[in-house]
């Protein structure tokens, strides 16, 4: 059951990552007053595209390799990789959330005005991409918990000793 859930979450995250990449890369809007805005103008969006590509490629590799005994016996590989991908995705979600906050609210202290009134379509596609990326992040958070369970279940739990036994062992 756990293997099926693991594989399903990995496969489910692939189209989410691909859709995120497609939405961000094709996101552009031209405004006669301010010019053209593209994803390549914002470093945070380029970062999200890179992380989505890493996430999708890793999810595909992990889903395929989870059916091979050699990789399944190496629980620490999935544990470490799932943790790394989940943390990378958290950073990219945070970066895009900050971009969205600035585009909707601006920053008066540095004289940035809000941009979504002029680039509404761009902002809406960015929000949809963020939701899809957040869903993929949720998948990887669950996968990180599953892989942690698999990895740490290989070891014996620590023994509970009385304080008297601990003192005797120290002496």
Image: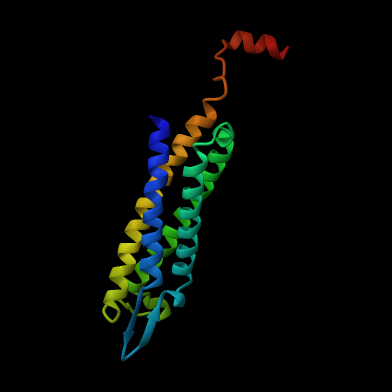
Tally of numbered tags: 0
Specify whether residue 54 is in view: yes
* Residue 33 location, quadrant: bottom left
Colouring scheme applied when the structure was drawn: rainbow
Q: Percent x, y for residue 18?
A: 40, 60
Residue at 48% from the left image edge and 31% from the top image edge: 149
Q: On the picture, is 116 further left or further right than 26?
A: left
Q: On the picture, is 159 further left or further right than 49?
A: right
**Position of 69 relative to 57 (above/below):** above
Residue at 48% from the left image edge and 59% from the top image edge: 53
Q: Of 72 and 162, which appears nearest the observer?
A: 72
Q: Percent x, y for residue 90?
A: 45, 53
Q: On the picture, is 163 further left or further right than 50?
A: right
Quadrant where the image shows the N terminus = top left
**Position of 38 relative to 33 (above/below):** above
**Position of 87 relative to 151 (above/below):** below
Residue at 28% from the left image edge and 69% from the top image edge: 124
Q: Of 109 and 131, which appears nearest the observer?
A: 131
Specify whether residue 88 is in view: no
Quadrant where the image shows the C terminus = top right
Q: Percent x, y for residue 29?
A: 33, 80
Residue at 40% from the left image edge and 47% from the top image edge: 11
User: Residue at the right extreme?
Assistant: 171
């Amino acid at each position: 059951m756990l293997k099926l859930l693991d594989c399903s979450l990995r496969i489910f995250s692939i189209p989410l990552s691909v859709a995120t990449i497609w939405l961000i890369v094709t996101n552009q809007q031209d405004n006669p007053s301010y010019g053209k805005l593209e994803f390549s103008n914002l470093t945070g969006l380029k970062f999200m595209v890179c992380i989505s590509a890493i996430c999708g490629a890793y999810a595909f590799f992990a889903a395929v390799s989870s059916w091979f005994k050699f990789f399944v016996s190496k629980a620490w590989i999935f544990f470490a990789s799932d943790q790394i991908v989940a943390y990378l995705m958290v950073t990219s979600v945070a970066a895009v959330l900050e971009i969205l906050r600035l585009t909707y609210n601006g920053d008066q202290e540095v004289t940035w005005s809000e941009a979504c009134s002029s680039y509404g379509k761009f902002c809406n596609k960015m929000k949809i991409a963020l939701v899809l990326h957040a869903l993929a992040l949720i998948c990887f958070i669950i996968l990180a918990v599953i892989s942690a369970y698999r990895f740490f279940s290989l070891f014996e739990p620590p023994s509970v000793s009385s304080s008297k036994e601990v003192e005797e062992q120290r002496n």
